[in-house]
Image: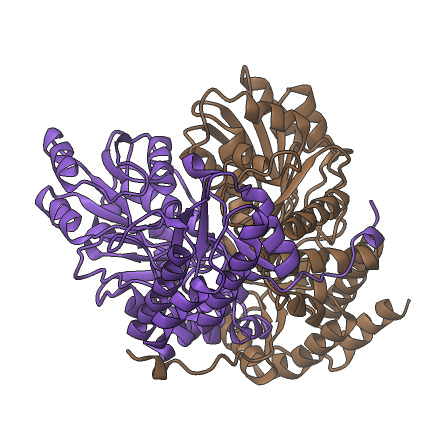
Chain colours: A purple, B brown
Amino acid sequence: MSQSSIPELNPPARILLGPGPSNVSPRVLRAMTAPLLGYLDPDFLEIMNGVADMLREVFGTQSGFTLPISGTGSAGMEAGIANLLEPDDVMVVAANGFFGDRMAEMGTRQGATVIKINTEWGKVVDVDQVRQELKRHTKVKVLSVVHAETSTGVLQPLEELSQLARDYDALFLVDAVTSMGANPIDMDRNGIDFCYAASQKCLGAPPGLAPVGISNKALNAIENRKSPPRTWYLDIGLLRSYWNEGTRVYHHTAPVTMIYALREALRTLLEEGLTNSYDRHALNGRALRAGLEALGLQTLVPEPHCTYQLTSVQIPDGIDDAAIRNVLLREYNMEIGGGLGVFKGNVWRIGLMGESSKSSNVLLLLSILEKELPKAGFEVAVGSGVAAASKILSN
Amino acid sequence: MSQSSIPELNPPARILLGPGPSNVSPRVLRAMTAPLLGYLDPDFLEIMNGVADMLREVFGTQSGFTLPISGTGSAGMEAGIANLLEPDDVMVVAANGFFGDRMAEMGTRQGATVIKINTEWGKVVDVDQVRQELKRHTKVKVLSVVHAETSTGVLQPLEELSQLARDYDALFLVDAVTSMGANPIDMDRNGIDFCYAASQKCLGAPPGLAPVGISNKALNAIENRKSPPRTWYLDIGLLRSYWNEGTRVYHHTAPVTMIYALREALRTLLEEGLTNSYDRHALNGRALRAGLEALGLQTLVPEPHCTYQLTSVQIPDGIDDAAIRNVLLREYNMEIGGGLGVFKGNVWRIGLMGESSKSSNVLLLLSILEKELPKAGFEVAVGSGVAAASKILSN
């Protein structure tokens, strides 16, 4: 190997309509070219404060502690599970997809007793089943659920589960990786104790950071652990000493440039307004669904439980998953997602997240499908998808 | 809080001469504005291959497995410790500073039996002491050491320790966070089994990635674990399934933009040539040492055991650590590092790493010290520091 074999970086400009990363605005990309600061530079500490403040607003918490974990969404998941659980603690995972399964796997690695409630993929969690499971145990430490399951496109209502967590004095752990920026999180109102998200989906920054919000109840539980968490890198107590304005104790070198990007993405989101962003994601998602259905494709999750930022659609019989996605990528520079886990080969996952959630992407994808699906042997009424979407977008 | 209170991002252009992050070249910053790709996009997989290839060259390994961990240097440290060690395994940490202590702490959190050999800060590790410790135990699983201690500026010779690890059939774990890019790592020749570094020091990228190199012996040990590692996010077996060209199984969304930055930084480094980079770091570091000593300041670690990319210097009696660093920051936009741990308040740590390692930074810092130290009560012969440094730089 010699460096001459590594050409200049020149990635194609893809339209990213997969499960993330989504496209990033020029404004956010530009923020990353700002000069770096040291991790204890007073000007950087000010930037950290701004990020934590904006995160509080997006998480919907007045008193909760917020920070971006220096890793991707899965690092946020592990931070939650590894800090809330000690060996032999009981965690009930209300799982209805790939990422619920991941939570359970992580809980096991912490030495916890994990009870996974398996809901069929594509359905919302059955609250009665969760209640029965909570009843069966003397003490459940954590009840966890995925708000928006990226593997299926199900949006899980949180109110009843939150009430259950309170009733049984369990900490309520919520995965908001795909919901944050597209759905209200309302951490305080929903009684969420630990919530984690990811920078690269509906927040509009590149992947690499996992914003987390932690309630005072969860902070107390972490402070009162019998033993330190098994992870040092994701130890919330130590991270808090660095992110807390009053202490600022060095833990690890903050990923300065990624924090610049997240800051600019959050500024963009709050300038648009949270409600406007939720509405935009819903409108474009509804238009896409209408268009896909007009083409005769079947969406996997019916309203009102579908996520509009991620639409799962069944691949028609006889259509080659990889072949179509390859055409989209190679001929149109457009990425859509394949299925994950049990949906591999049967489902496409179409993301309209963050900067990628715009009407032009909806119309372009539908018109490409109108052109390409018939070639692959699936007949559609040309124009019907775009017409159905346009009708919704014009309302 | 409203977003209007968060002003536009506008960090000052600091000269970063602390323990990292160091300055990042415009070329690397610009790479981060490239369009994002999905984590399974064929064009991105090609980029990953290039990064892994270049890392093999910088780690000095033909057959080792290389990848950048999606976290900072400390995530690389935890990846090594959590994957190599199982509960009740024995780890011997040859510690001579802050980061050796951190290794020991992480080992304990994995349930391992940790034996920490405490060498005085600022000294190299006593190999005989390590040998005695290895002899005392039936089976030591891991022997670990820090190549370049960022808390002190000691460069640890690796040959003898490596031989000891081989003799006692222990895996040899090396922290190359501050050495990679400034000192040869020679993973294969030095018999290193797990080596981790960081993007933001002598490699010239922003903080956020931890390149790791793993020998086949270590990969075998990881494959043959009795139980999975306690960390899921840093599980090398799972990460390998994604980074391995033959498998490409999704683990977590790769931090695409940071990988662009690392790629461009590695290209820059290999264009300069590894040996030239090592020489540049040594030359500028020698010039700085000569200048500081000419001013009557005392460097902490004598040659040949000092790192040239990080010079520790004792703060003269009566000089206020924070006041001087504040003057540098506020009046000259220059950061130097304070002391860590037992050196807090007594030591400055001056980094000349990556893009920050250049003669103009040496000369500027020395001329600032010549101007400012007398004001703070420490007399110096004005011009002597710059003259001593210039002499070395001109040779």
Residue A224: x and y, percent? 22, 44
Question: In the displayed image of the protein, which residue is found farthest to the right?
Answer: B395
Q: Position of B245 compared to A273: left or right?
A: right
**Which residue of the protein is positioned furthest toward the top in this rendering?**
B138
User: Where in the figure is residue B76, as x and y percent of width and height?
Assistant: 55, 44
Find residue B333 and report its horizontal and vertical position in percent. 59, 80
Point 54% across, 43% down: residue: A321
Which quadrant of the view contains residue A127? Answer: top left
| Horizontal relation, residue B52 to residue B20: left or right | right
| Residue A257 visible to the viewer | yes
Q: Nearer the viewer, residue A23 or B179?
A: A23
Identify the residue at image location x=83%, y=59%: B272
Between B261 and B146, the one nearer to me in the picture: B261
Residue A87 occupies which quadrant of the picture?
top left
Identify the image quadrant of the N terminus of chain A: top right
| Residue A181 in view, yes or no | no
Residue at horizontal 10%, vertical 41%? A168
Work out whether A131 lies above or below A266: above
Q: Is residue A196 above or below residue A260?
A: above
Q: Is residue A96 above or below residue A194?
A: above
Q: Nearer the viewer, residue B218 or A18?
A: A18
